[in-house]
Image (spheres, rainbow, N blue to C red):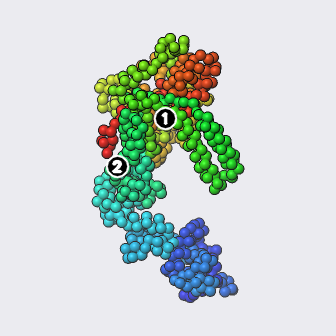
Amino acid sequence: MTDSVMAATVPLGRLVPSKMNVRRVGSEVGLGELAASISAHGLIQNLVVRRAGKGKAFEVVAGGRRLGALRRLMKDGGSVLGVAVDKDFPVRVVVQDAGEELSLAENVQREAMHPVDEVEAFGRLVDGGMGVEDVAARFGQSVVTVRQRLKLAALSPRVLNELRSGEMTLEQARALAISDDHAAQEAVWFGRNGWSRNPANLRAALTSEHVRATDRLVRFVGLEAYEAAGGAVVRDLFGDEDEAYLADRELLVRLATEKLAVVADELREHHWKWVDMTLESGLSHGSGYGRIHPARRAFSDAEQAELEQLAETFDQLEEELEGFAEGDDGIAAVEAKQAEVEQRVERIRKGAAAFVPEEQALAGCLVGIGYAGQLQVVEGLVKAEDRRALAALQAAETPEAGDEPADAPQGRAMAETLVEELTAVRTAALRVELTRNPAVALAALLYPLAVRLFFGARAYGVGSAVELSGKQRPLAPAIREPDGCRALAAWEATLAAWQDRLPAKADDLWDWLLAQPQAVLLELLAAVAAANLNAVKSRQETDGGRLAQADAVAGALGFDISGWWSPDAAFLSRLSKAEIAAALREAGCGEEAANTVARGAKAEAVTVAAQALDGTGWLPGVLRPKLPVQTDEVLAEAA
């Protein structure tokens, strides 16, 4: 016996969902898109209904989502093919007595459209003259989704055939879509196999000649400035919103050079002997330069008064901030005012420090780009050929021996225990910074391995800061007060965070590693490299090669210890008065301050010196960065 079937139209208001409909999960997903499609194209497939008892209502046993979409159109005042949808809107139905079996058959037998057929259909619509926005509206999709499908539709026909046949995954196709060059797509896909066809490798191969939008040169120049100059940008529609690649490296280098040249030209007007530019990173690290420091004068009465007024203004703004609720729109405006106050304070402080004109005539500046893309200017650098003249100049200005304080420094080296502690603090900070830069960490790990493998005996005397022993040198024993060391606390917090991410048992580590994406493995590599880094200068240190390579790692990181350490009273109390006075002279605090410290009591000397050195950026010799020799020739090569 067969079920009776009858085609009819039923007013929308008389249709109700049936409890026999088997679709329970996901029935609301994509309902807005379905409503948009029905509005633009009509109800393509009839609903299947059965009479609901003795009343006039009909239960929808197949097509519950279509019913939900029609009800949404009615609620929103929508229409279908220009006809308003209300409770009397006629809906085409098939009346059939079968219930749950029919609903199950409709959902089980339904087969999703193949991705290639779908993207090609979208492509034909646009080729036929329909705008992207119109396609999105008519099918209830976002414009981004439509653009993604059109990007896939534009793939090489050979590549699409691979996707259609199942030889390629959708993620692999999305990776190949980063390029519009069919020949390049085919060469990358058909030229490799197996694991080398993972999406990350495919995307990297197609963008190897490009510059990522997150590169420091791009941040310095600005993506908008690059595009305004005619530079082409390749955007990954399937990646993050800011994932893009710059195709014209030569233009980017030229724009960066021109921007640096503006700063260099301004500096040349300030009576420096030379001003060099570099596109290399870490320009304030390495070796080869001497250094002069500005002399700091006392603030004038007017400057002191303005500084006090600015301090009061800053405190008032801070109180104003405390009155805001989190997320309040007014917070940004107040913080902007605070930034203006801080900038003015910094200008006054800089104005109170100036280089000695005779010394400045023998020194110069380096202008470059920091790791994060910020402008970096290092002033007061002395080249090797000018050191003798500078030494003669400074010797002529040195007071006669009889005028020096009785306890003037006689060149005594800093205590070995203090050197070990300072370099242990530096190592902790370096480890934290290295975990934030997997690229440098990878280089630091490869360095000792490549040296041993390819150079052998020829590498005698070459050291490595990363000691591939699988263990880390403990730093706390070398630091007198480890609980108060910011760098050590940050490093231990980094290790603890990784301990939480890794499996509890070593037996599970290998499987865990194989399951991780490449980005996670690079992060872990950086942490492991950092744990093995040793830049501590121990007593009776003999491995100068290791320490030199540690300086090279710091240079590659653009490392700045001043963010982790400053000469506080605890440190100064461990120096002699003569050493404290020498520090004040080096920091440009003036001869008067140095003589006052040398003549006073030790406790007073420590207090005065701590206040005077605050904000000067002074560092003991063992912590000072080594400056590289970089000139215009380097810039020319980079260009």
Within 10 Å of the Cα at label 1, are there few (<14), some (14-19), or many (20+) other Cα atoms?
many
Above-or-below relation of 177 to 447: below
The residue at the point 45 percent across, 68 percent down is 146
Place of residue 28 in the rendered image (x, y in percent of width and height, measured from the top left): 59, 69
Q: Amino acid at mark 2?
A: Arg
**Which quadrant holds the N terminus?**
bottom right
Pick the front one: 258 or 270: 270
Local secondary structure at mark 2: helix
Q: Which badge, 2 or 1, comes first in the chain's sequence?
A: 2
Within 10 Å of the Cα at label 2, are there few (<14), some (14-19), or many (20+) other Cα atoms?
some
Q: Is residue 433 visible?
A: yes
The residue at the point 58 percent across, 28 percent down is 612
Residue 636 placement, left or right of 307: left
Marks 2 and 1 sit apart, C-alpha to C-alpha, by 28 Å
Place of residue 351 in the rendered image (x, y in percent of width and height, measured from the top left): 52, 36
Q: Disc 2 marks which residue?
A: 254
| Residues at discs 2 and 1 in contact (Cβ within 8 Å) | no
Above-or-below relation of 302 to 218: above
**Which quadrant holds the C terminus?**
top left
Place of residue 158 in the rendered image (x, y in percent of width and height, measured from the top left): 31, 63
Which mark's residue is nearer the viewer, 2 or 1?
A: 2
Res. 560 mark: 1
Pick the front one: 203 or 27: 203
Above-or-below relation of 448 to 54: above
Q: Amino acid at mark 1?
A: Asp
Place of residue 502 in the rendered image (x, y in percent of width and height, measured from the top left): 53, 41
Local secondary structure at mark 1: loop
Pick the front one: 278 or 394: 394
